[in-house]
Image (tube, rainbow, N blue to C red):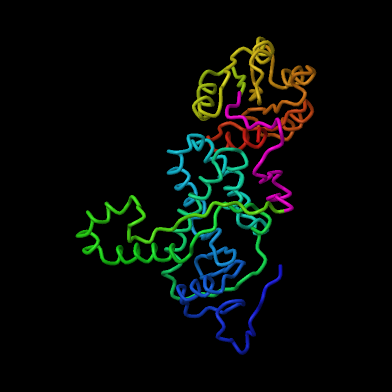
Amino acid sequence: MYQIYLDKIKMSTTPIGGYRYFQKLHPLSLLAQLTSRRVTGCLHVFTNKASWSIYLEEGKLTYASCSEQLFERLENHLLNLSKEAPSLHSATRMQVRLIFEAKGENQSAPDTDYQAICWLVNQNYITANQAALLIEELAKDVLETFLTLKEGGYEFSVETHLDELPKFCYLDLRSLIEYCQKKIRDQQNPMVNSSNSKSASSMTVATPSSKQPLPTADVRQKPPAKNNNINSDSGIKTNQHKPAGATSKSMYTIACIDDSPTVLNSIRHFLDENTFSVVMIGDPVKALMQILRSKPDLILLDVEMPNLDGYELCSLLRRHSAFKNIPIIMVTGRTGFIDRAKAKMVRSSGYLTKPFTQSELLKMVFKHIS
């Protein structure tokens, strides 16, 4: 990645365009210069505790991110957005975290929060306009913490990881800064804020004549990038328009075969009813016909059952043309090497060990149906 560096020995006073050692920071001055110069790139600011990334295109803000509580922040705003986007229920939000938070632990996969937003749009969980509003609310939170920084280091990159990803908005950075400054002042002067609570509440609904500097998202789309792959490892595309005939499922059918009613009820409880339809099968002998009728997207199969154990049933299912490619997950309390080898021999797709948590179950399910 091409980056412009300052002379580290002379330590030029030029604030934009290079790397700076830890020093006193003037966040407002940095952002003002970015806006006035109408720069394109990313300002990376870092301290001992966290890092901030401010992405711009011709002086307009396209995204802002902070490494501290990255996915907690995103999840909170997705929860707020779920009032307007019902598809953002708990299972979807957990799926986002399971897919992208794990990638974020790998330093070679940066900007995973933005990738998550692109994925949500691509999967039709949210619209491009909703993504723009989400990015605006996230930017307010990030800039509010950024403006309070007193010292740190920074560098400016002309090329960024977001260059090949779709852009959903181009925000007025000055308006955002004014909004955040007012919020910071209100927090620092609670008595003044309390006395003006009535006027503040009346300003929550913005009107053309309002004096409150509220940022406005420009959601006009720029021409799509040549390469819209988020990550070659993820298999996730960020193309805004799907090919003709392509569909995104809103409900998945999960067949659960287990002779224990307790396990069956636990799995049904773990799987959100807005996303999953759980078919519970207690008799393995009758499982084949019930599975044929339900046409599941994935099968959870207990290993230890009377009359017909899970390995035998999995082998039978794989011989049937309808179940050659359906994911079959073996569910068992056995953890030995031989048991896992048996599961591979009968061509199971995965191995889930009892007892398991809701998070472990969802991670396994989404791994094979996404």
Q: What is the x, y in percent for residue 109?
A: 66, 56
- Please say if 314 is above or below 54: above
Q: What is the x, y in percent for residue 49?
A: 49, 66
Q: Which quadrant of the figure has residue 37?
A: bottom right
Asked whether 222 or 51 is in front, the reply is 222
Q: Which quadrant of the figure has residue 293?
A: top right
Asked whether 113 or 305 is in front, the reply is 113
Q: Is residue 98 magenta?
A: no
Q: What is the x, y in percent for residue 216?
A: 45, 56
Q: In the figure, is residue 189 to the left or right of 133?
A: left
Q: Residue furthest bottom?
A: 10
Asked whether 87 or 92 is in front, the reply is 87
Main secondary-structure element of the magenta-colored stretch: loop
Residue at 35 percent across and 52 percent down: it is 206
- Please say if 262 is above or below 51: above
**Quadrant location of the C terminus?**
top right
Q: How many marks?
A: 0
Q: In the figure, is residue 12 to the left or right of 28?
A: right
Q: Residue furthest left?
A: 195
Residue at 52 percent across and 55 percent down: it is 218
Q: Is residue 248 magenta?
A: yes
Q: In the figure, is residue 370 to the left or right of 97?
A: right
Q: What is the x, y in percent for residue 70?
A: 51, 55
Asked whether 99 or 173 is in front, the reply is 173
**Quadrant location of the N terminus?**
bottom right
Q: In the figure, is residue 93 to the left or right of 344?
A: left
Per the rendered image, the range of residues in magenta is 226-253
